[in-house]
Every structure is written in structure tokens, then in C-alpha cells.
Amino acid sequence: MFFEDEHKQTVATITEPILAKKGSKSVIRANTSHKARIAGVYVFVSLKASTQRVVVTLAKKSDHQALLHHLYQVKRRAGKGRVYVTLDNDGAHHAKRLKRLAAKQGIHFRYLPSYSPDLNPAEEPLKQLKTYLRNRLFFTVEKLKQAIRTFFEQRNYTFDINVEGIYKNPAGVRSM
């Protein structure tokens, strides 16, 4: 079972408060141009629940073609047999062509309830990625891509996420 999520990371610098000595000026170089807010890359992440390892694909846009390419990477790493992928309810995830082509490769979908990102453990690696990229300066998409690759390589594509804990007592979900 894999959990999939995607996120657009832009070249623009995301800043957070920093500590500085009283009376001193803190200086942060930031790329906040209009082009920087548009230029970026989509990061597709699929987390395998049993091994805590992720499959990562970088794409120029987030559509059913990019997702299908990512799912083929997931299937290649999973090997023979059926692969079940849990997705959120993004419109691209419901494309008929995507479902048909994925089924031919043995990839089957499960969908999370609407508006429930807390039930998707694949959100955690993306959250950690955003934290890692904060206060960093990028002027090109290639430099951003390299930083994203480095982030996942440093962690050996493995994340310690308590998947059971998410489903034992998910926030906002009641038993009926």
C-alpha cells in the first residue's frame, strides 16, 4: 500500500523568523521576484506504508500525465503484482484515462475522504521538505531540483512515520 501526495515548490524564498542579538540587524537574502513565484517544480511523493520508504518524481506540471509517470516509477519499484495507491481527491486523480492506463499496469486506487490531509502519511515528507527549503536562496529551477534531491538522498528516501497511529485515532474522524 502506497500513499501519494504532490506539492508545488517554487524558486521564491520562503522565510521564517530568525533569532538575532538585540540591537543587531538580521539580514536574509530572498528571491521574491514575480518570476520566482511562478517558476518551480512539482514534487510527487509516494510513501510505502510497510517500509517507510518514498518514491519521488519531479515534474513541470501537476496533471494526470505527470501523475501517471510517477505511478509507473512506483510500480517499477514495487515489482510484480498489484499495487494499491491511496490518493487525495485532486481532480487529476479521477481522470478516466489515468485510471484505465494505471489498471493495465496493475495499479489500483483508493481515495481518502475529502478535506482530510491528516489521514495521508505522505504529507509528512513534504512538510519536512518545506522546512528544509525555508530560508534558502534559489535563482534557478535546477538549483531547487538539486536541493530537493539532496533532501531525499540525505534521508535515504526513508521517513519514520507512524502510519498505524494515524489510523488508530485520526483527528476529526468519529466512529459510527
Image (spheres, rainbow, N blue to C red):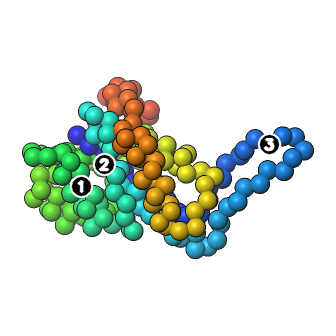
* Residue 106 numbered tag: none
Q: Secondary structure at mark 1?
A: helix
Which residue lies at the image location 34% right of the left edge and 31% below the top edge? 163
Picture quadrant where residue 104 is located: bottom left
Count of number-bearing discs: 3
Which residue lies at the image location 49% right of the left edge and 55% below the top edge? 147
Instruction: Judge the density around disc 2: few (<14), some (14-19), many (≥20) Cα neighbours within 10 Å.
Output: many
Q: Is residue 134 visible?
A: yes
Mark closest to the chain's N terminus, 3 or 1:
3
Instruction: Judge the density around disc 1: few (<14), some (14-19), many (≥20) Cα neighbours within 10 Å.
Output: some
- Separation of disc 2 and disc 3 at Cα? 38 Å
Mark 2 = which residue?
Answer: 55
Picture quadrant where residue 167 is located: top left
Image position, residue 43 (x, y; %): 40, 57
Q: Is residue 117 visible?
A: no
Tag 3 near tag 1, CB within 8 Å = no
Image position, residue 101 (x, y; %): 15, 63
Tag 1 near tag 2, CB within 8 Å = yes
- Amino acid type at circle 3 is Ala
Mark 1 = which residue?
Answer: 73
The image quadrant where one finds the C terminus is top left
- Separation of disc 1 and disc 2 at Cα? 7 Å
Mark 3 = which residue?
Answer: 20
Q: Position of 38 compared to 28: left or right?
A: left
- Separation of disc 3 and disc 1 at Cα? 44 Å
- Amino acid type at circle 1 is Gln
- Amino acid type at circle 2 is Val
Furthest toward the right, the residue is 23
Q: Position of 86 compared to 18: left or right?
A: left
